[in-house]
């Protein structure tokens, strides 16, 4: 390990898109400011800022932490870091990080523990279900249309690309001791408890189309541009069949952008939120947010993380449950709602303490120094630790 790396003394470089459009990072950004940690937001469109960043990085031996970069941002930073290195990597989704970065990072830091399991060769990328071979674009935006058009070619190219990924895995220098766990943080002010009239029985506020380009060698090439949120899409589509027969359903089928205050209000107005980590079983922040807002979930639990989650979610198998099987499951969930809401409220304060960004930064520093992950974050039977 490298106890010489002190997070409070590192230079944090955050992606511009994440800083502007992903509220999940706001609690961490606030803590970095409060702790006096230097944080720069990368502006790839400004040549002046890129040169300024290059001068700053090259004139210092300060360790750099890369937070939530997009592909274009990775491309811009690589010439700056190519010879210097001395950086660690915190991607939004670990399977999107380019191979060069994961190879040369001092630490690969994961928001989701299944990424550590997959990268350590202890679990497959998809442990249960597979996405449909083809998916139509949902919102008809440019990115989704491109992914739908590229999907057939991606399937044809997958055997050759997977051979290349196999070669990458064979020559890569993977050291599980360099895999650190840094869950998504949460802050009390982001999830206020307020009394709202219940308007919906079941609601979905999550994306139902998730296609990506799989850059990591442990992410199979045949999943390029596949819909990894097919489970969430199928579940809300099935539940929506029962809208007004007899349940009230909010499906957000247009998937339009909503301000954070409106999102939290809709959560508080719902008895249950549809929630899955996708077919890849990621520990998305919605699990935390919904629980801390006092709203239980219906969907899938997680294999390794969130040991408290099973008391706050009605588990279903979205890819295999039938319409006939689902309706009594929904009725059972409504009956269990009062008890499950109390389960959420009972664990709220514990979660706000465990997942406070200051707590998580301290735990990350401990892992850098070779200490284990603190209790309360992983299930007892997770079967592997990188510590």
Image (spheres, helix red, strand yellow):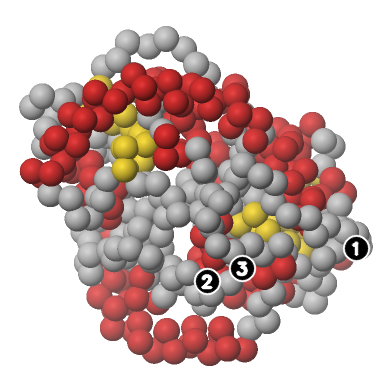
* Vertical order, 215 against 172 (above or below): above
To which residue does mark 3 refer? 75
To which residue does mark 2 refer? 122
User: Residue 43, image x and y in percent?
Assistant: 65, 52
Kindly check if marks 1 and 3 are in contact, taking CB atoms under 8 A apart as contact.
no
State which tag comes first along the sequence, 3 or 2.
3
Residue 264 seen in the figure: no
Task: Name the residue at 44% across, 31% down.
Answer: 290
Q: Secondary structure at mark 3?
A: helix
Within-10-Å neighbours for mark 1: few <14, some 14–19, many 20+: few
Mark 1, mark 2: which one is toward the viewer? Answer: 2
User: Residue 342, image x and y in percent?
Assistant: 43, 20
Task: Name the residue at 73% across, 55% down.
Answer: 372
> Between marks 3 and 2, how big is the CA–CA gap?
30 Å
State which tag comes first along the sequence, 1 or 2.
1
Residue 136 seen in the figure: yes
User: Residue 304, image x and y in percent?
Assistant: 51, 54
Dividing the picture into quadrants, the one containing residue 369 is bottom right
Kindly check if marks 3 and 2 are in contact, taking CB atoms under 8 A apart as contact.
no
> Between marks 1 and 3, how big is the CA–CA gap?
21 Å
Task: Name the residue at 38% across, 65% down.
Answer: 127
Task: Name the residue at 35% across, 58% down.
Answer: 279
To which residue does mark 1 refer? 61
Please tell me the numbered disc located at residue 114: none
Within-10-Å neighbours for mark 3: few <14, some 14–19, many 20+: few
Q: Is residue 51 left or right of residue 143?
A: right
Q: Is residue 111 left or right of residue 257?
A: right
Mark 1, mark 3: which one is toward the viewer? Answer: 1
**The N terminus: image quadrant:** bottom right
Dividing the picture into quadrants, the one containing residue 49 is bottom right
């Amino acid at each position: 390990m490298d106890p010489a790396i002190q997070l409070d003394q590192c230079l944090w470089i955050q992606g511009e898109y994440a800083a502007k459009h992903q509220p999940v990072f706001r609690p961490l950004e606030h803590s970095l400011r409060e702790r006096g940690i230097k944080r720069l937001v990368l502006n790839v469109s400004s040549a002046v800022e890129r040169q300024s960043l290059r001068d700053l990085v090259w004139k210092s031996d300060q360790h750099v932490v890369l937070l939530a970069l997009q592909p274009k941002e990775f491309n811009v930073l690589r010439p700056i870091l190519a010879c210097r290195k001395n950086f660690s990597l915190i991607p939004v989704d670990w399977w999107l990080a380019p191979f060069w970065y994961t190879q040369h990072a001092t630490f690969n830091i994961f928001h989701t523990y299944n990424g550590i399991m997959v990268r350590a060769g202890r679990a497959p990328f998809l442990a249960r279900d597979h996405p449909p071979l083809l998916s139509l674009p949902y919102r008809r935006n440019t990115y989704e249309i491109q992914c739908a058009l590229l999907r057939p070619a991606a399937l044809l190219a997958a055997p050759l690309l997977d051979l290349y990924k196999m070669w990458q895995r064979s020559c890569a220098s993977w050291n599980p001791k360099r895999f650190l766990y840094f869950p998504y943080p949460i802050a009390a002010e982001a999830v206020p408890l307020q009394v709202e009239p219940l308007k919906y029985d079941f609601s979905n506020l999550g994306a139902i189309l998730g296609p990506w380009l799989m850059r990591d060698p442990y992410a199979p090439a045949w999943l390029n541009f596949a819909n990894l949120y097919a489970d969430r899409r199928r579940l809300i589509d099935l539940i929506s069949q029962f809208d007004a027969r007899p349940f009230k359903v909010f499906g957000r089928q247009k998937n339009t952008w909503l301000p954070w205050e409106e999102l939290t209000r809709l959560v508080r107005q719902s008895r249950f939120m549809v929630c899955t980590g996708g077919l890849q079983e990621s520990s998305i922040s919605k699990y935390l947010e919904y629980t801390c807002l006092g709203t239980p979930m219906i969907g899938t639990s997680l294999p390794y993380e969130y040991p408290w989650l099973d008391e706050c979610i009605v588990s279903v198998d979205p890819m295999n449950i039938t319409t006939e099987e689902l309706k009594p499951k929904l009725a059972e969930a409504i009956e269990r709602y009062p008890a499950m809401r109390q389960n959420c409220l009972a664990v709220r304060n514990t979660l706000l303490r465990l997942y406070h960004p200051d707590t998580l930064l301290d735990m990350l520093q401990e892992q850098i120094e070779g200490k284990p992950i603190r209790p309360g974050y992983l299930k007892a039977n997770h079967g592997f630790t990188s510590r």
